[in-house]
Image (cartoon, coloured by chain):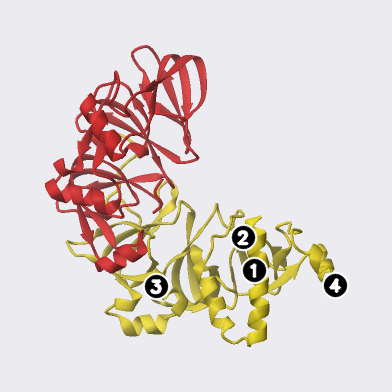
Chain colours: A yellow, B red
């Protein structure tokens, strides 16, 4: 064998449901039934026994009924595929750490960009918080994080960028810091712009449950948040729309400076 | 000869007369002893280190040129590049390694490198593969005994291919391969889906033959 290091893997030595040896950034799933996978997260696969593994877009799958029952999120439907067949599938996500979670008749909400895959035993719904997805039921799913995940119990106040998800506790409320609130209460609207410290908005968790944190990470621009806002804009009247246009204008000018 | 792993993102090279090291320009982090660096013209295989003008020219035209530098003298050099993961591969000389030039951090200068037209690896299909996957039409081939340091996003793992066993790899995640392998492009979804997504599962590389594939644990190109 030409290369002496590292040791090559094959279907006999690959784990069935675990991270690859010495690599927290890659995960191997032993595919036995349909698995929902976010597009682009598949890195490699070994089909078993000369068969094939198919990756079908949700919009063009042979399992329409199953997908319709399990995947209740039109916003994200274009970003996911169903993997079906027999074999080993290796997944990776931007070099982030990958963890597997087991849900037992539970619910867990996770940042949409960090959800890699979930098996068809789970049901997916959109969270009330934009950019997050909720998984319900019993089954396994995979989520990524920038650095290892830290588990915290409420009550806790979290930076939105560090939030990976939360389980079994009520959805968070937003908390604004005192300085930020002071501007509003003092009606000092002119002084509002340019005062952002980056910590003015936090998520507040209360009740019993678990909150999942990662080392803080700049949140990518999530196109789905915009699409969701678009849908809500349709409920506004002409005056409100004009006001919104003004707000967007002044925000854009902020960015140009 | 050879590199030592310092962290997952830094390697240490021992440099002696007769054991020079070629590395990507800008990858030097620190040196000890008396080391001099000089640029190598024409990328891997160019200049005084093997190869020829023709191959250097071809590379320059096709983007398979990454500026290299050679470390000479006596001492040690730490290499790393933009926080990317580094994987050390020791080759025994029996089989060449194919790798994209931008994945190559450093290698022993005693190894000979050449640029291969992908069309030579599987005829027209090879050329089509390079064009479709964005790898370009050329790839670097390293042969001889020595140590190679590969760059990746998220660290690499190796997959064995052999017998009837076939593996399918995402083109963005493919880093390098060693051995007698055939890489074929397969479009799993319709062409329109593949174009619309870019890094989706639309385009896949089917790898068959006998050898080892190096795959990074991320779908992001460097």
Q: Which chain carries label 4?
A: A
Q: Is residue A45 visible?
A: yes
CB-based contact (under 8 Å), mark 1 and mark 4 = no
Q: Name the residue under label 4.
A: A185
The answer to which of marks 3 and 1 sits earlier in the sequence is: 3
Q: Do the residues labelled 4 and 2 touch (CB within 8 Å)?
A: no
Residue A141, percent from left and from top: 45, 68
User: Is residue B161 positioned above or below B18 on the image?
Assistant: below
Residue receiving disc 2: A161
> What chain does mark 3 sit on?
A
**Gap in angstroms between the C-alphas marked 2 and 1:** 25 Å
The vertical placement of B112 against A168, above or below, is above
Measure how far apart labels 4 and 2 are at the Cα level: 26 Å
The residue that label 1 is drawn on is A249
> Element under label 3?
helix
Residue at point 71%, 65% (across, down): A201
Mark nearer the viewer, 2 or 1: 1
Of mark 3 and mark 2, the one earlier in the sequence is: 3
* Residue furthest left in the image: B123
Within-10-Å neighbours for mark 3: few <14, some 14–19, many 20+: some
- Residue B10: percent from the left, percent from the top? 48, 33
> Which of the 4 image quadrants contains residue B54?
top left
């Amino acid at each position: 064998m030409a290369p002496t290091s590292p040791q090559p893997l094959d279907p006999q030595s690959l784990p069935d449901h675990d991270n690859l040896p010495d690599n927290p950034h890659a995960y191997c799933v032993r595919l036995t039934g349909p698995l929902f996978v976010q597009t682009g997260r598949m890195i490699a696969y070994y089909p078993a026994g000369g068969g094939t593994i198919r990756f079908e877009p949700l919009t063009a799958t042979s399992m329409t009924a199953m997908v319709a029952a399990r995947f209740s999120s039109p916003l994200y439907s274009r970003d996911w595929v169903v993997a079906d067949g027999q074999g080993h599938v290796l997944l990776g996500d931007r070099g982030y750490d990958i963890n597997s979670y087991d849900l037992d008749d539970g619910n867990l909400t996770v940042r949409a960009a960090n959800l890699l895959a979930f098996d068809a035993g789970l049901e997916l719904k959109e969270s009330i918080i934009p950019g997050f997805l909720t998984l319900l039921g019993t089954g396994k799913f995979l989520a990524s994080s920038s650095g290892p995940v830290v588990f915290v119990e409420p009550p806790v106040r979290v930076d939105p960028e560090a939030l990976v998800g939360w389980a079994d506790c009520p959805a968070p409320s937003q908390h604004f810091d005192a300085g930020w609130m002071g501007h509003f209460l003092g009606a000092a609207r002119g002084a509002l712009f340019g005062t952002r410290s980056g910590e003015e908005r936090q998520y507040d968790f209360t009740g019993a449950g678990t909150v999942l944190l990662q080392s803080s990470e700049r949140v990518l621009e999530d196109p789905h948040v915009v699409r969701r806002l678009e849908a809500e804009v349709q409920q506004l009247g002409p005056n409100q729309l004009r006001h919104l246009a003004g707000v967007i204008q002044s925000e854009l000018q902020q960015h140009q400076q | 000869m050879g590199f030592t792993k310092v962290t997952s993102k830094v390697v240490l090279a021992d440099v002696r007369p007769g054991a020079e090291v070629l590395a990507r320009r800008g990858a030097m982090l620190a040196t000890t002893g008396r080391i001099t660096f000089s640029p190598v013209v024409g990328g891997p295989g160019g200049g005084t280190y093997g190869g020829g003008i023709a191959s250097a020219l071809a590379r320059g035209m096709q983007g398979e040129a990454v500026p290299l530098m050679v470390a000479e003298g006596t001492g040690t050099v730490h290499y790393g590049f933009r926080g990317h993961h580094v994987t050390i591969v020791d080759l025994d000389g029996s089989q060449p390694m194919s790798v994209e030039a931008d994945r190559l951090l450093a290698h022993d200068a005693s190894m000979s490198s050449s640029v291969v037209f992908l069309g030579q690896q599987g005829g027209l299909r090879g050329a089509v593969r390079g064009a479709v996957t964005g790898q370009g039409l050329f790839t670097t081939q390293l042969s001889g005994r020595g140590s190679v340091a590969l760059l990746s996003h998220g660290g690499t793992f190796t997959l064995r291919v052999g017998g009837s066993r076939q593996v399918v790899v995402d083109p963005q995640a493919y880093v390098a391969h060693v051995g007698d392998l055939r890489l074929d492009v397969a479009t799993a979804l319709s062409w329109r889906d593949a174009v619309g997504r870019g890094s989706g599962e639309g385009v896949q590389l089917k790898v068959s033959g006998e050898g080892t594939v190096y795959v990074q644990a991320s779908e992001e190109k460097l």
